[in-house]
Image: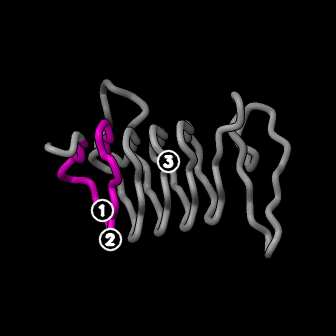
Amino acid sequence: MLSGAEIHPRCTIGRRFVLDHGWGTVIGETAFLGDDCYVLGGVVLGAIGIADNPRAKRHPTIGHRVQIGAYARVFGPVSIGDDAFIGAHCVVRHDVKAHSRVLLKSTLQIIKERVGARIIEPRCEGRLSHE
């Protein structure tokens, strides 16, 4: 309560979790965070709907060593792969592959995928590039 974060007591959080400047952060009931995750303030790991929520999983599953930037929103029962990076102010409503980076560039979100030693920056027209 003193940190300004609202973390549901039924969510699952792995070892060595860091919530840096947690004011305004919300982590929902069925959210799962793996080990060594780093989350900045204002992040929401929430459900999509607000009425008639099912008892099923409705919050994100976050892999190991994931970093989530300030004020990012991850909604619904999506999966964020290990070692992914979600940039500040991004809104994520689809699965994100392991080792991917989701960044906000002007009004579009893109994913950069690492292929070997190269980083591939696919063209994006207003949606996640791996769809």
- Give the alpha-carbon distance from disc 3 to disc 2, as whole Å: 17 Å
Q: Residue at x 76, y 45 (%)?
A: 129
Q: Residue at x 71, y 50 (%)?
A: 111
Q: Position of residue 19 (x, y in %)?
A: 33, 55
Residue topped by disc 3: 69
User: Which residue in the rendered view is the most extreme toward the left?
Assistant: 1
Disc marking residue 13 = 1
Q: With respect to residue 30, does 51 lie above or below?
A: above
Disc marking residue 71 = none
Disc marking residue 16 = 2
Q: Position of residue 21 (x, y in %)?
A: 33, 47
- Give yes or no for residue 63 being in the magenta stretch: no
Work out whether residue 33 or residue 25 is closer to the camera in this orientation and state it.
25
Nearer the N terminus, badge 3 or badge 2?
A: 2
Q: Quadrant of residue 32?
A: bottom left
Query: In the picture, which quadrant includes the N terminus?
Result: top left
Q: Which residues are magenta?
A: 5-27
- Give yes or no for residue 18 being in the magenta stretch: yes
Work out whether residue 90 or residue 21 is closer to the camera in this orientation and state it.
21
Q: Residue at x 54, y 67 (%)?
A: 82
Q: Position of residue 96 (x, y in %)?
A: 61, 54
Instruction: Kindly state the secondary structure of the residue where label 1 is placed.
Output: strand
Q: Is residue 2 left or right of residue 50?
A: left
Work out whether residue 46 or residue 4 is closer to the camera in this orientation and state it.
4
**Amino acid type at image mark 3:** Gly
